[in-house]
Amino acid sequence: MLELDWVDVGKLLAAVVAGAVIGLERETHDKPAGFRTNILICLGAALFTILSVRIPEGFGNTERTRIAAQIITGVGFLGAGAIIQFRGNVIGLTTAATIWLVASVGMAFGAGHFLLGSVVTILATAVLFGLESFEVQIARWRTVATFELELSASEDATDIVRRAVCDANVRIKSWSVSRTHDSVAGRLTAAGPAPRLESLEKALLQHQAIRTIRRL
């Protein structure tokens, strides 16, 4: 029977705190894996790591890394569940990476490496909170927008879109068009600074041949 070790309790409590700190950023941004999820992942990883050490001590010289190795596999399934492909875009990669990182932090605390786990927690929190404003600045000069358009069938849709893109000084990533008997449906993905993409949207909205436009 495994006895309660207060050092192990300290490891578990440290994992809870670390998971809470990292999960706070995900929670404030309404991500699927938020506050409680990250706490539980970090706590579970710490417990499995502790057990991978304690079980061989109490029940014979078995392979210590076997349980810890399976943590990576289990966390991989959780991370995969957080990734979604929607309309050609991949969503949830940061959340999946956070799950992966939180598990590693839990393993660090479970193995008794308090300093290492604390340093990684601080670095992860700094990245999640501190680099958000930097990403906003990046998006202002390099972002991607997708537009769904409906145009009159009598107009040359490709010519209209290419002129608008040229005037806005952005780059076309993809352009597809389908025709019916009375209209043309198009899907445009363009890349460029955020202000120029807004100018492109306004130009398309003002064009008489365009019946509807929707930015995804």
Image (cartoon, grey):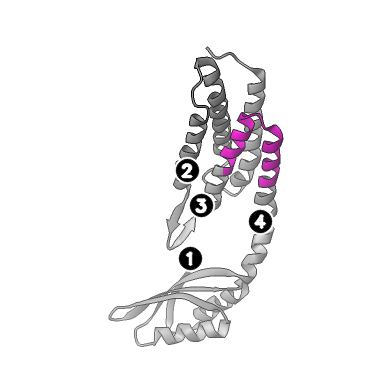
Q: Nearer the viewer, mark 3 or mark 2?
A: 2
Q: Secondary structure at mark 1?
A: loop
26 falls in the magenta region:
no
Amino acid type, residue under disc 1 in the picture: Leu
Dot 1, crowdedness within 10 Å: few (<14), some or many (≥20)? few
Residue position for label 4: 132
Residue bearing mark 1: 216
The magenta span reads 101-124
Name the spot of residue 137 as percent of width and height, x first.
Answer: 67, 65
- Say what secondary structure mark 4 lies in: helix
Residue under label 3, please give it: 92
Residue 118 colored in magenta in the image? yes
Specify whether 152 is left or right of 35. Answer: left
Mark-to-mark CA distance, 3 and 4? 15 Å
Give the vertical position of 214 relative to 31 (above or below): below
| Label 3 SS | loop
Real-space Cα separation, disc 2 to disc 4, in angstroms: 25 Å
Q: Amino acid at mark 2?
A: Gly
Q: Earlier in the sequence, mark 1 or mark 3?
A: 3
SS majority, magenta: helix
| Label annotation for residue 76 | 2
Q: CA distance from mark 3 to mark 2?
A: 13 Å
C-alpha span from label 1 to label 2: 29 Å
Asked whether, in this view, residue 190 is left or right of residue 130, the answer is: left
Mark nearer the N terminus (3 vs 2): 2
Query: Comparing marks 2 and 4, which lies closer to the viewer?
Result: 2
Q: Who comes first in sequence, dot 1 or dot 2?
A: 2
